Image (cartoon, rainbow, N blue to C red):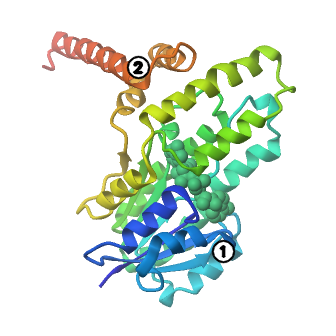
Amino acid sequence: DPRTVLITGCSSGIGLALAVKLAQDEQQRFKVIATMRNLAKREALEEAAGDALNRSLEIKELDVRSEQSIRDCVDSIPERHIDILINNAGVGLIGPIECQSIEDMQGVFETNFYGVVRMIKEVLPDMKRRRSGHILVMSSVMGLQGIVFNDIYAASKFAIEGFCESLMVQALMFDIHLTLIEPGPVVTEFEMKVYEDAIRGDYSKADPETADLFTHYYLRNSKAIFSSLGQTPDEIAEHTLRVLTMETPPFRHQTNQVYTPLTALKYADPSGHLVNDVFYKIVFQHDTLMQASLRAIKLLRWKVQKVQQGAKNLGFL
Ligand code: NAD
């Protein structure tokens, strides 16, 4: 029997690509409930789904900021039976914090953090009763390593990483799998929306030096990073499908190998010097991600050698 998958935020980007990929699976392993906050935006998904629409893919309304909306959607599913929950809905926010209101910041947490918590609270008791299920969260490499001018977004992803780390062991006791998918840059409407808003933004609340760092250095450079190393939503969907069909799914899965060394630096040097140096060069000195990654690998190798030497000296190796 196909497994029932509920995905949030399917009107665009990764959510749309993933809903279509699972619904069009040749082995017909999935029955997809593709949800979105605003059903008026269903056209792109309907078009991409083609024949799968109303066969292996059903579209429903769900706003992750509303418990009632979540409850109504889950209650409409036969026996509330969801095998796989994919928390994809998310919003971005970039810029100097001087220019962001506390309400803007809380909005990011309402979706990226509490939105996921609300979803998990709704489906976890059913999964526990059935002693099966898989919960995935579209996190980000920014859930592992913050980036300048992404302060609040990164914090919201760190928050959900901490939540899932804590929940993971309990979930395992009930044979429920939990997976954080951690993409690097992905070229979607999301990224474009954030970028367009940023370009048009008013930074008069920040001092001119900060505004200049953001608009001239950060924005220009991040556009270059996205266009050189950005993955497509379809690549992220492909990675997610692979994780879904694994016998023992991992707790964490990064989709971009170039980025991985950059998320390991802080463990190699807990003082934070290495990581600050590498990210400073990426954002303000036009180091490409590839150059930065190669530098990170060298630094990591050097650190590992030092740890091994220490272990040898202590007689462990
Ligand atoms: P996107 O903007 O195309 O997709 C996000 C979707 O979430 C949209 O369809 C939006 O309508 C929906 N959404 C927003 N608020 C919602 C709410 N309250 N209820 C239901 N749906 C809501 O962008 P995307 O890149 O496809 O983002 C998907 C996920 O991937 C997000 O969680 C994002 O943080 C994460 N991510 C994106 C990138 C990237 O570079 N684009 C990188 C790493 C992780």
Look at 57% across and 72% down and name the residue there. 35
Ligand 1 closer than 8 Å to label 2 CB:
no
Can you tell which of label 2 and label 1 is closer to the viewer?
1
Q: Is residue 115 visible?
A: no
Secondary structure beneath disc 2? helix
Q: Which residue is mark 2?
A: 292
Q: Callout 1: helix, strand or loop?
A: helix
Q: Is residue 235 left or right of residue 311?
A: right
Q: Which residue is mark 1?
A: 39
Q: Position of residue 206 (x, y in %)?
A: 82, 23
The quadrant in which the C terminus is found is top left
- Corner quadrant of residue 171: bottom left
Q: Which amino acid type corresponds to the residue marked 1 in the rendered image?
A: Leu
**Vertical side of 1 occupied by 204: above or below:** above
The residue positioned 68% from the left and 20% from the top of the image is: 216
Pick the front one: 130 or 139: 139
Direction from residue 313 to residue 140 in the image, left or right: right
